[in-house]
């Protein structure tokens, strides 16, 4: 029987720690010790050269991880990245954008809430279930970026962490699990399957990212000079405004006594747009869809130059917006078109009857 070859890359995080006090494991092999592995699976384990708390992980380092996976792509059937949970959703979003539909093999990014040595640890179950999913996905030609969380498999393009202590730490807003790890692996809707045309074209890696992008949570009590100061000092190329409802931005005026000027968030968006800074509008709600034309305040934001980030999760919005700005730094319409295109399942589907 030919073995299913799985490439395992350890990048750090809680899952990658052992001992008391906690320290980074000497190797991925040390983490795998004692974990049940399917008989038809052969593991190859490597350690990423920078192993750290995932809170410190940069997009530039995610690019390095992706390139290491790409280097090994032709030699393996499936891939596992062991990762800290705090920024795991950012990494699955990044991989989804890096590889897009050219990834024609399964890639699982997995973390844990406890370390391997702690009593009651989830590490063994997380890793064992991940290897089972890799094998099942390979046999059934399922492809793409996913996360395994205890007994559920989630689409990496819409992943979000919902709990700091609960073992069921991840979910996908507006979506159900794409598979479940029961005594037998059970497939649900939402899995992507191998496309023979894309598979023969091999893996493509798109890693363009704009670094100077920030996020501000906006309410009627948030002074707009936060954005104005960044415009004045040319700090940003893009900014995401997390707002209310379907994209409403408050238009109450504020007086900046330092400069003796009065302006609103709508004025700040217009000033940013004029300065070449792209402004994306994001809904904070799980089923949120930004529809800027629906309400007057949203329409004013759109007229000022705001870009709808549609129904993207916060992690995917950050990644996709940065990617779009890097690709089309001076073309707002192309950025909006790219954001509004559902590339790998990152947007909520369906339409609303407005009759």
Image (tube, rainbow, N blue to C red):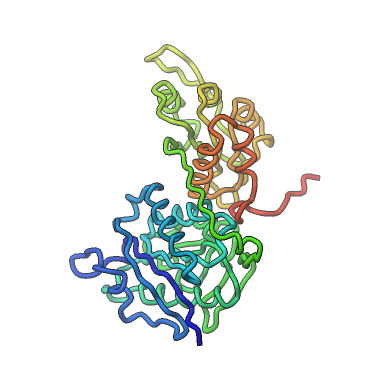
Residue 89 image offset from top left, x and y in percent: 46, 56
Q: Which residue lies furthest to the left in this view?
A: 21
Residue 304 image offset from top left, x and y in percent: 60, 25
Give whichever of 196, 48 is nearer the camera: 196
Residue 345 image offset from top left, x and y in percent: 61, 56
Q: Please report the residue visible at 40 percent of the width from the left and 76 percent of the height from the top.
A: 43
Give whichever of 260, 103 is nearer the camera: 103
Q: Is residue 88 above or below residue 179?
A: above
Q: Please report the residue visible at 46 percent of the width from the left and 26 percent of the height from the top.
A: 224
Q: Is 34 positioned to the left or the right of 214 in the image?
A: left
Q: Is 12 positioned to the left or the right of 341 in the image?
A: left
Q: In which quarter of the image is the C terminus?
A: top right
Q: Is residue 192 above or below residue 216?
A: below
Q: Which residue lies furthest to the right in this view?
A: 355
Q: Please report the residue visible at 51 percent of the width from the left and 57 percent of the height from the top.
A: 159
Q: Quadrant of residue 250?
A: top right
Q: In which quarter of the image is residue 111?
A: bottom left
Give whichever of 216, 51 is nearer the camera: 51
């Amino acid at each position: 029987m030919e073995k299913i070859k799985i490439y395992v890359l350890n990048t750090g995080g809680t899952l990658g720690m052992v001992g008391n006090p906690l320290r980074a494991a000497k190797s991925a092999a040390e983490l795998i010790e004692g974990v049940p592995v399917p008989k038809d699976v052969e593991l190859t384990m490597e350690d990423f050269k920078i192993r750290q708390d995932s809170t410190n992980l940069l997009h530039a380092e995610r690019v390095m991880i992706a390139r290491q996976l790409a280097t090994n792509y032709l030699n393996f059937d499936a891939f596992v990245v062991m990762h800290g949970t705090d920024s795991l959703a950012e990494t699955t979003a990044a991989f989804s954008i890096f590889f897009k539909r050219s990834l024609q093999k399964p890639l699982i990014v997995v973390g844990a809430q406890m370390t391997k040595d702690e009593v009651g640890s989830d590490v063994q179950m997380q890793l064992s279930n991940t290897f089972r999913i890799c094998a099942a996905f390979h046999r059934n030609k399922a492809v793409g970026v996913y996360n395994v969380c205890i007994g559920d498999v989630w689409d990496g393009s819409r992943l979000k962490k919902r709990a700091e202590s609960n073992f069921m730490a991840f979910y996908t807003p507006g979506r159900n699990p794409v598979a479940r790890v029961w005594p037998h692996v059970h497939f649900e809707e939402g899995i992507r399957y191998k496309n023979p045309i894309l598979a023969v074209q091999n893996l493509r890696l798109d890693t363009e990212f704009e670094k100077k992008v920030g996020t501000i949570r906006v309410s009627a009590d948030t002074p707009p000079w936060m954005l104005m100061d960044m415009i004045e000092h040319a700090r940003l190329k893009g900014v995401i405004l997390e707002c209310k409802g379907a994209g409403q931005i408050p238009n109450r005026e504020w007086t900046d006594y330092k400069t003796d000027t009065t302006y609103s968030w709508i004025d700040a968006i217009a000033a940013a747009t004029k300065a070449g800074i792209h402004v994306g509008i994001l809904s904070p709600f799980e089923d949120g869809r930004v529809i800027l034309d629906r309400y007057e305040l949203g329409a004013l934001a759109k007229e000022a130059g705001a870009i709808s980030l549609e129904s993207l999760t916060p992690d995917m919005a950050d990644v996709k917006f940065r990617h779009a700005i890097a690709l089309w730094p001076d073309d707002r319409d192309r950025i909006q078109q790219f954001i509004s295109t559902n590339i790998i399942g990152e947007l909520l589907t369906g339409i609303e009857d407005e009759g």
